[in-house]
Image (spheres, grey):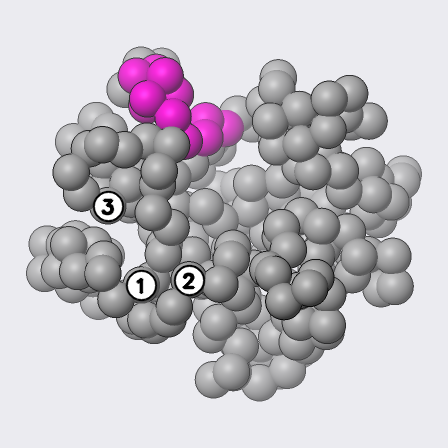
Amino acid sequence: MKKGGLDNGSVPAGGLGTRLQPIGFSKELAPVARRAIIEYLLERLLVAGIDRIFINTAADKTDLITYLSLKSKYRDHLIYLVRERKGLFDGVALPAQFLRPADELYFGLPDTIWYPRDGFIPVRDHTGELVLGLFDTGTPERFDSVVTDKRGQIQSIKVKVPHPPSPWTWAIGKMTVRAANTMRKFEYTDDKPRLFGDIMADYCRHHPGYAVPLSGGTCLDIGTPADYNQAEDFVKSHEK
């Protein structure tokens, strides 16, 4: 608990996973080293003491809800919110409607695996209404490139640009409910949901946001069959 607020995990798990299909089930359940991909994120939230986790999903993802509620060892920490698909930001911010302004939402992507396991801890310990955890993936052009100043304040976030200004990309973060509610004003353009990175970039133009580079950290986004084929070796190489 910080400054009167409670810590909550928020996992956006409503995506169709079209890049990874056809696998015949929700992408968050794709097995890697005998675990569903989503469970790597759940484990890392719990390592940082985040033991109430909202799973924000869609009505047609009954296999995901069934597995997590009946078979996952993390089931006692999970709360399910079912919504229509509105974009990644909404998938992260959805629990804000039930929480207080100072409460914090810790978020990550359920189809990524990253190390170190305690990566949420430096994010947790950094003050700020919005704090991102950064990884050097080696391919920042595929993700959201984040530029900070010497104090760690975010100067820009560039989404999938050909020549990224920074090698650092975000994969995890936290934001207060107050920040999430402020970001709602940047959520749509012409009634279409905007990319989460663009929403955060606009927020940081008007309000301070911060980022913590996780030195020595590594992250694998399992979004395509080629990425998924690397996942088993990726985990084994970091869990010897």
Which residue is denoted by mark 3 in the rendering? 26
Who comes first in sequence, dot 2 or dot 3? Answer: 3
Q: Residue at x 47, y 84 (%)?
A: 98
Residue matched to label 2: 85
Residue that mark 1 sits on:
58
The answer for how far apart the CA atoms under marks 2 and 3 are is: 15 Å
Q: How many marks?
A: 3
Labels 1 and 3: the sequence-earlier one:
3
Give how far across and how far down residue 28 sits, in percent. Answer: 29, 44
Look at the picture and state if 44 lies above or below 221: below
Q: Are marks 2 and 3 in contact (CB under 8 Å)?
A: no
| Range drawn in magenta | 219-231
198 up-or-down from 220: above or below: below
Pick the quarter of the image with the C terminus. top left
Q: CA distance from mark 2 to mark 1?
A: 7 Å
Q: State which mark lies toward you, 2 or 3.
A: 2
Look at label 3 and name its amino acid: Ser
The image quarter containing residue 150 is: top right
Percent coordinates x, y for residue 124 in the rendering:
60, 56
Which image quadrant is residue 71 in?
bottom left
Is residue 41 something one can see in this rendering?
no
